[in-house]
Every structure is written in structure tokens, then in C-alpha cells.
Amino acid sequence: MDSRQATPPLESDSSSSDREEEDCSTQPATPSTTTELTQLIHEHSSITLLKNFPPSSKQLINQQPSKSFDKHPDFIPPTNQLSLLRHSEFGFDPNELDFCWTSQFNPTTTTTTSNTENHSPEDAPYFTYLTTYWSYLLVFLIGHLRDAIGKRFSAKSHAHLKLHNGYAALNSDFDSFFTRRVKSRLDDCFGRPVTGSPARTITLLDRTSSDNCISFKYPHTTTQALNIASYNYLGFAQSRGSCADAAEITIHQLGLSSSGSRDDVGLSPLQIETEKLLARFLGVQDAMLVSQGFATNSTTLPALVGKGALVISDEYNHNSIRFGTRLSGAMVRTYRHNNMKDLERLLRESISQGQPRKLRAWSKIVVIVEGIYSMEGSIVDLPNLLRLKDKYKFYLYLDEAHSIGALGPNGRGACDYYGIDPSRVDLLMGTLTKSFGASGGYIAGSKKLIEHMRKTCHSAVYAESPSPPVMCQIRSTVKLIMGEDSPSSPCALDAQEGASLSEGKRRLRRLAFNARYLRAGLRKLGFIVIGDQDSPVVPLLVYQPGKMLLFSRLMLERYAIVVVIVGYPATSLVSGRVRFCVSAAHTKQDIDQVLIATNEIGEALGMKLDWGSKPSPRWSVERVINNASQLVAGSL
Ligand SMILES: Cc1ncc(COP(=O)(O)O)c(C=O)c1O
């Protein structure tokens, strides 16, 4: 903390910010032709141009960050256990043995959003809602006023907003208005440019804006910050370590590209082996790799369902699922998030009525859910879903993008977490971008179904097979998680069992601890946190748009912690949030830091729950930190 407080704020370099002010007035418009570009280069000095654009990766290689989160980011102790090295990518925790947990559903002790009246956005006091609506109302009024004045007095630059020369307005909808007049004001907390691997820490390209985030300038300095924003659940997003080394060797042996789809000449022994390994890991008969996670959903679903079929989808399902079902031509109906009563009502209604206007039964019914919902932090209610499946005989498609590797004692996702046989789920889909630090996705299930996918899924037939180093990364990480590739070392949990844990298991235990600790700690501090106890996605509700921007900035400037802010349209307008994503790469100390920083900034911004006349159950941050293990065990 000391080193971070000593760190000057982002805009503290007064000489450089003065220069930025000057640069702003001469900021070039986006050049459209080569002649215009040449002209621009003559008009503006090369230094000015460079400062207005992010530095190239060439300029950044080997450049030390101007501000560092770690005092010794490159300290490497003499050990051959690469995952334990203390460096910025995977935090070395000397007390790792004390801070472990197993991610496992326990019907008597686990509290879930589906079995309790957990915190929900409605928990906020009316005053919070009032001020949130008021903030948006004010910004909307000013925005509409500016649009009206612009259309009247600056018709040319506002042509896209109104009828012109017989053409319809190009951007006249609410989303366009929201992006131009609201989101653009908050852009400093979105889309931060980064360099290096999105590991435990991340290096951000510093940027400044003197026109309320309409444009940014890059002073060519960087800040190393604690990264609690990436989906690096198991900490495998590393540019060093055994997996990265293996991927490097693969590039030397097999190159970077598969150069063809599996139906042409793109199917390698490496892909066949990786698919077999994935199927074994997931506990199913077969699996197929796809080179992109989004495309796994959007191209698998049209191969599974079509006209005459019914897809029943959770209201918060990911865009790739929505896109895939829309492409398929199947009828889509949605039910309330993770609400099994609403799903059953919809099932009964749909089955009894059949296809509209045809008086025919549905050709098939597929229910699509996610293992962990990345905006809500909730875990699918799989046991009750399977009860409904047995009763109503629908096919179940489970997207495990965020739950594979992140849930269950063996990291095998939602089925593993609940102790359910994975063959009860018809199709298991997952992405390899998150827990595995790789890229692409998979679809897994029975041999027959996967063979059908290999012949009909557009990604298998028309898209290139995954790149060899990516498949190598998938193989190495899956093997580590399965404990097939690494030396074991003792850990507190298994000390009692007289066994030893592999590196993969240690990562799983650390992630499970961090997830429960951060969520429980934030709740004890008085914040409104949604989602399930064991989910590594921890959304903290902020509500007001101004606070979203301030929270993100203050976390970075004061504590060198980078967070993700999520708002409309990914959430409803009034439930803007900070989404913390914990990782196995974080140490207990890192989570302590996040709690200290959030506590201080949340207090200053009035983000804590107002308990009204009831006695305050809030804890001090010291009490939270000193009782971490008990909080995780749920004994307090
Ligand atoms: C539930 C879900 N499915 C699919 C995807 C797409 O995966 P990818 O980002 O690997 O393309 C995502 C992305 O975050 C997701 O959250």
C-alpha cells in the first residue's frame, strides 16, 4: 500500500499535462486518404502526432512501467516450480497453505441466489434510485438540448441524426443517443488500452483527456496495476512459466497457423489429441474444438436447432447464444434469470400449446443456460434444472465459458460443483479464453452428437482450426488442472488427508478461497454485492453513473488497482456495477488490498448500504482481513 500511496496520480506530471493542453487544440481529424495523411504530417510535428496515438508495441517492449504495483516485479527465487515464482504474473503467497478452499456445493451450508433471498439490486435505498434516475435525467436533458441546438445550427455535422437529401437519419435511436451523450462522458472507465499479459498485474497505457473523454492523448508512459478485471480465473494468462514455454516450443515446431478447416487440410494430430484430452477432462465421450469462443455458440446452435424447434433461454444469456439462436430460425422464448418456477411455467405453456398457428408439437425443445453468469456472478441452479429436464424431456445446452476451470473441486465446471454426472447434460459448451489463458471454444457431449457437429457446424466445415500454440496451451493447462503434468507439493487441506496437491489443484483451491473471501468481505463492509458465494465473478452495485467513473479512476490513481465497470446496455440502466474477477494468481494480500481500497473509496462515494434504523452489521476492514478464513468457511 505504501508504495502505491507514494505513487503520484496519473495526471501529476504537470509539465507533460501542460503540453497535452497545447496538443489538444491541434489534434488532427482522422485522415481518410494518403494525401490527407501526408498533409497532416507536414502540418503537425511528428511528436504531436505520436502523442495523440497509443505507442506501438515496439516502443513498449522492455520499457519499465512509470508506476509499479509490485516493488520487485522481476524477483525470481531459486525454485523450479514456475507457478510459485514471485513475479507480477502469478503472486507468490508464503501463506498459501492457510488460504485454501474447495469449490463444492453443499446443500446445507451453501447459500445461492436461487435458494435464498440474496442481495438483489432492489436492496438499495430509495434515495439511491432517486439520485440515479436524477443523474440520468439531467444528462439526457442536456444531451437532447445539445442535439436540438446542433441540428438547428450545425446541420452539416448533425446530418446523421436527421433526414437529409431524402435519406433517413442514420443514427436516431436511443442506443446511439446513449453512446454519444452519456457513455462517451464515462469513456475513461471503459476500454483502457493495455500492454503485456492480462495476468495478476497488468500494464496500462497512461492516457489523459482534456475534453471530457471525447479524445485521449497518450504521454507514452505506462502504469503497472493489480488486475482484478480479467477472466484469468486460474492464473494461466501468463507470458512466462511452463505453459508459455511449451507454447513457444510448439511455434518453433509447428508454426502459428493451421491454415485450413478440419474438413480441408487443417486437422492435425495435435487437435485430435487435444480434443480427446478435453473429453476426458470433462468426463464425456467426445469434444470438438472451435477456434473462437463466440463462434462456438453462434455456429453450433444453428447446427442443433432450426425451424419448428423451440429454444428456451435464460434472460441473461450471452450475446453469442442469442445470435446463434437467431441465426438458427428456431422460435426463442426467455424465462426469468435462474428462476426454475418461471422456466417450468414456460415449459408447460409451450408444450401444451405447441407451434403457433400450426397445431403441431415442437420438433424439439432445447433449454440454454450458462454455468456462471458473467454480469450477475450467479451460478446456474443445475440440480433443479435437471429435475425439470427429466420431467419435461427437453435437451439441455450448458455454456460453461465462465464456469469451466472456475467451479468444482476438479475445475470441471457446474456438474463437478454440484457432483452431477456430466452425461446428464446433452451439450457442454465452453470457451478456452478464460480459465485456460488460451483462445477458442469447445463443444462436448455424446460421440453421436459431436460427430454430427463435426459434419454440420459451420466452424468445423468453413473456419480454420485453432492455431498450434493455442492448442498446446490448452493441453498444458488441462493437464496441469488434471494433475497429470506437475510435481506435487504439500498443502494444508490435504495435509489432513495425508496426500499432496498438484499445481492445478493448488490453483483451484486458491481461486475458491479468493472468490469467497472477496464477496464475503465486501458484504461485511456494507456493500451491495450480488451473485453466488462460490462464483469468482463478484459484481458490486454502484448505480450512479458519476460514481462508476470516479470509482474506477480512484482505484487506479490511489491504489494502482484496475477494475471493470459494467453499465447499460450490458445491465439495466440503473444497476451499473463494478465487476471484480478474482484469480488464482491473486494472493490473500492482493484481495486485502482490494478490500482496503474499495472500503475507503466506497465510503467516500457513499456506496455502502444504508441500514436505516437497524443496528449496523458493518465490519471494519481490519476485522474482515483478520477473519478471512472464518469468513470463507461461513462460520461468521
Ligand atoms: C457465456 C459466454 N459465452 C461465450 C462467450 C464468448 O467467448 P469468447 O470471448 O471466448 O469468444 C462469452 C464471452 O465472454 C461468454 O461470457
Image (cartoon, rainbow, N blue to C red):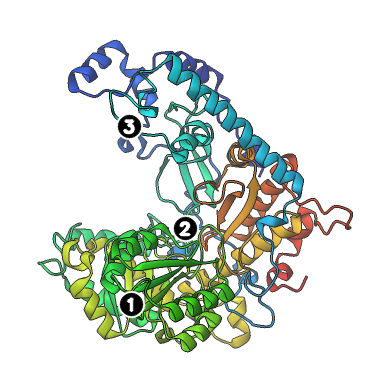
Quarter of the rendered structure image containing ligand 1:
bottom left
Q: Nearer the viewer, residue 205 or 153?
A: 153
Label 1 or label 2, whichever lies nearer to me, is 1
The part of the image, by quadrant, that contains residue 459 is bottom left
Image disc number at residue 168 = 3
Q: Residue 434 location in percent, x, y?
A: 42, 61
Residue reaching furthest to the top: 43
Q: CA distance from mark 2 to mark 3?
A: 41 Å
Foreground: disc 2 or disc 3: 3
On the rendered image, what quadrant is the N terminus found in?
top right
Q: Earlier in the sequence, mark 3 or mark 1?
A: 3
- Of 419 and 559, the residue lying toward us: 419
Q: Is mark 2 within 8 Å of ligand 1?
A: yes
Q: What amino acid is labelled 3 in the image?
A: Ala
Q: In what element is the residue under mark 1?
A: strand
CA neighbours of label 3 inside 10 A, class few (<14), some (14 to 19), many (20+): few
State how far apart marks 3 and 1 are (Cα). 46 Å
Q: Residue at x 56, y 72 (%)?
A: 342
Q: Is residue 40 left or right of residue 593?
A: left
Q: Is residue 206 above or below residue 608?
A: above
Tell me which residue sits at (61%, 73%) in the image: 101
Q: Residue 453's spot in the image, x, y percent?
A: 24, 75
In depth, the one of 122 and 589 nearer the eye is 122
